[in-house]
Amino acid sequence: MMDNSGRINRYFNDYKADFEAARIAEKRNNIEGACKLYRNAALALCKMAELETGETKRQRIMHAEEIKAIADNLAKAKAPNPRQSDRAPSPDQGGGNGKTGGTEENIWKSEGIPETSFDDVIGMEDVKQLIRTRVIDQIRYPELYSQYEVKGGTGILLFGLPGTGKTTIARAIAHEMNAPIYTVQLSDVLSKWVGETEKRISQLFEAARSTPVSLIFFDDFDALGKMRQNEGTGHGNQVIVELINQMDGFRRNKNTIVLLAATNRPWMIDSALMRPGRFEHHIYVPLANHDARIMLMKKVLGNVPTDPDIDLDQISDLLKGYNGADIVSVVNGAKVAALQRAKALIERGEDGMSRVSYDDMVQAAKGHKSSVNPGDIAEMRRYAEENGIELPEEM
């Protein structure tokens, strides 16, 4: 479990992220957002104070009161300008026209609506049902969700071991939503130029607002949202602060933006991004279970000639603990073995038919070690335990 020092560091990161985001929101005249973020920063300081003593505790409380006063005074002093709606949107607010600053072209283009559907996600029925409830159905049946006061999720974190199909699931979600997808990698947003990183993220959300429904997918999110050191500055800090500003502005969107992230290392993500209203819904994507492994093997085998008595049930037992990519490699290895036999037969002038056999599958399994790292399993179980998340016995 996390000790007091770890908790204090986590709350310090929360305080820093919220305070910096509040200052940016205030500069952009987002008074409601700034007040909320200032109060979040004050709350984080109070949480730190609960774990401290003496002069340090007193200073934390005083600083929290000062920040809360900033929020209170800002709310009182900054009354809405009745003529504000007559003004053209500022560059930071965006105008939904694909431009930033009125002249610069937006760099972000969607991939369109993916063809990948839930039919391409083997097994994982519990995961798919959870996603339908928290993401897809709230878009299909908004009036129903409103009537029953059930809140879906606009910030979803898919986490699990490498090779479990998180990216495939993300694309399938966009398909089921009938929404264009924007896939984001670390290299897409980071820049060595001051202010460019934040501008790229702002442009990303601006582009996503150009359609009634859209999905932004951050792949390998731990690389973007990794936890900062207490003294941390630079790109990682810029990314997190701008993401917080954009996510806290979801309520002002007239359209629907679903923010989806995938990670193999959720413990590396900054805690400020895990707050309610941000990535508050965490969905574990497991390794394929016994039945799912059989289904995946059948799919990869397809119409390839196969021995009728091949026992995929036993092969599935051999592949316990393998991820989806490993299983695909094993089946492809067995197919290559059968192909080589067929080639040899043809070269001898014989019938070229050679079926994939049970022995082909066994030998391919023996020749391909699982790429799942036991250390990753231990870390994932530790993270789940600390956050009250129940994981299946078979990861």
Image (spheres, rainbow, N blue to C red):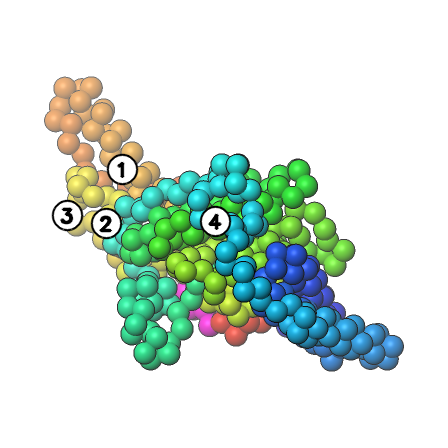
Q: Residue at x 64, y 68 (%)?
A: 78
Specify which label sits upstream in the sequence, 2 or 4.
Answer: 4
Q: What stretch is highlighted in magenta?
A: 390-394
Relative to residue 13, is residue 206 drawn left or right? left
Are there few (<14), some (14-19), or many (20+) residues within 10 Å of tag 4?
Answer: some
Specify which label sits upstream in the sequence, 3 or 4.
Answer: 4
Check if residue 377 falls in the magenta segment: no
Q: Name the residue under label 1.
A: 335
Give the quadrant of the N terminus.
bottom right
Image x and y of residue 55, in percent: 87, 77
- Mark 3 vs mark 4, foreground winner is 4
User: Do the residues bearing badges 2 and 3 touch, measured as CB atoms within 8 Å?
Assistant: no
> Toward which corner of the image does residue 361 lie, by quadrant?
top left
Q: Mark 4 points at which residue?
A: 95
Label 1: element kind: helix
Q: Name the residue under label 2.
A: 298
Q: Name the residue under label 3.
A: 308
Q: Is residue 101 above or below residue 296?
A: above
Q: Residue at x 83, y 78 (%)?
A: 58
Label 2: element kind: helix
User: Do the residues bearing badges 3 and 1 touch, measured as CB atoms within 8 Å?
Assistant: no
State the separation of the CA atoms marked 4 and 1. Answer: 54 Å
- Mark 2 vs mark 1, foreground winner is 2
